[in-house]
Amino acid sequence: MQPSLTRTAGSLASIVGLRMFGLFLILPVFAVYGQELEGATPALIGLAIGIYGFTQALLQIPLGMVSDRIGRRPVILGGLLLFLLGSVVAALSDHILGVVLGRALQGGGAISAVVMALAADLTPPERRTRVMAGIGMSVGAAFMLALILGPVLVTWGGLSGLFWATAAMAGLAMVSLVTLVPSSRGHQVQSSAPRLSSLVRVLRDGDLMRLNLAVGVLHFVLTGAFLVVPLILVDGLGMPVATHWKIYIPVLLLSVLLLIPAIGFGERTGRQRLVLMAALLLLTLVLTAQAVVPAGIGFLVTLWLFFAAFNILEASLPSLVSRYAPVAERGAALGVYGTAQFGGAFLGGVLGGLVLGGYGTAGVFVLCALASLLGLVFTLGLRSLSRREDMARVGSA
């Protein structure tokens, strides 16, 4: 990539990564330390952890549509300011309800779809998947760093210290946006208010809805799998939680060995659709294997393949959505995409928890494998970009 494009891609990845790091930071510690808050109950602790996903899913579409009309950067800046405000509210709160409110405000800064739309605006199609891959990997890196640093930081500053750290992350992301990200060149701002017709057209687009289902399945699987993977590492491999980074970091880095060739093949040959279906097939097979493979080297190999398939999909899906969506409705399309993403994560946690209680870790992997298979079946009907463009030309003739 050209130096200017590399800088843009890096700055956009840093905005998403810093924000997601702040959201993820409490996950490994809040269930324990949240009990110290006034008025805390198990139900309210769970609400505080999960409510950000609800507000994320609720606002991805409206903010994506607004960005189609007033521009990407103002919406991103406003979302980061709201995230910072929520972090401060949570940091100053001694009551669990104050933390719930703060987490809801954090999630209300639902700018993931808008950042993806800006990335699509600023990058040529042949480079877009690589930029999206960098953004997707920044989310994965943020998740891993949160698992490692959350327990360390909370021992230094308590929960309030964690939330002050998330406020600092928001500040850094705003600096990156203002100083490093250029204005969008590929997107013409519309002066009128967001129209419901844009959303209706996106929702009626069969190809886009197949991609939305795929990302919902992907994050359903991620949330469900991480209900049980830590348990297997503790109970099956005898690894304390504090040492799990010794597994996560190597398998994440090794996943690049499959990610880069897969993305490169799709870009060179124009067969991103084939790469998408191959990754979903791999994910289905890996999850099925994880339901029966005992803890040990075999399970670690499946964990590596899981991350490889996940990263390929995480990099490919937003790029495909941005290419299938009409330019004027790209923000709305990616807003629906973001809603499906966070909605899948929420359902994966709820249903995965229910299955874990009744059928154990193997049952959760079977549930996730079935969800992945469902995603694969639906993407079989996805038209290639060339066929879609040919049909569009015939329809407009």
Image (spheres, helix red, strand yellow):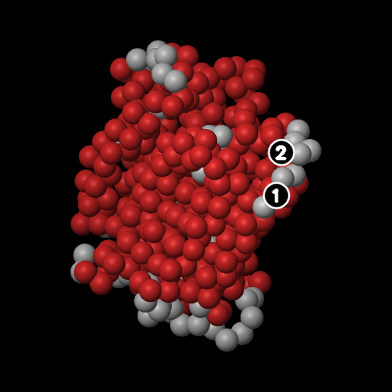
**Which amino acid, by three-letter code, is at mark 1?**
Ser
- Picture residue at 31% right of the left edge, 33% below the top: 251
Is 235 placed above or below 100 here?
above
> Residue at horizontal 48%, vertical 74%?
73
Image height of 41 relative to 92, above or below: above
State yes or no: discs 2 and 1 in contact (Cβ < 8 Å). Answer: yes
Q: Is residue 391 visible?
A: no
Q: Which residue is mark 1?
A: 93
**SS at mark 1?**
loop
In the rendered image, which quarter contains the N terminus? bottom left
Name the spot of residue 189 as percent of width and height, x first. 50, 82
For label 2, the residue is 37
Decide: is 301 above or below 91.
above
User: Dot 1 surroundings within 10 Å: few (below 14), some, or many (20 or more)?
Assistant: some
Q: Is residue 8 left or right of residue 360?
A: left
- Which quarter of the rendered picture does the C terminus lie within? bottom left
Q: Report helix, strand or loop for mark 2.
A: loop
Quarter residue 36 falls in: top right
Q: Nearer the viewer, residue 111 or 103?
A: 103
Residue 269 found in image quarter: bottom left
Amino acid of disc 2: Leu
Distance between the alpha carbons at the discs numbered 2 and 1: 9 Å
Residue situated in front as seen by the camera: 253 or 27 = 27
Q: Residue furthest front?
A: 156
Q: Is residue 308 visible?
A: yes
The residue positioned 20% from the left and 69% from the top of the image is 2
Q: Position of residue 40 (x, y in %)?
A: 75, 36
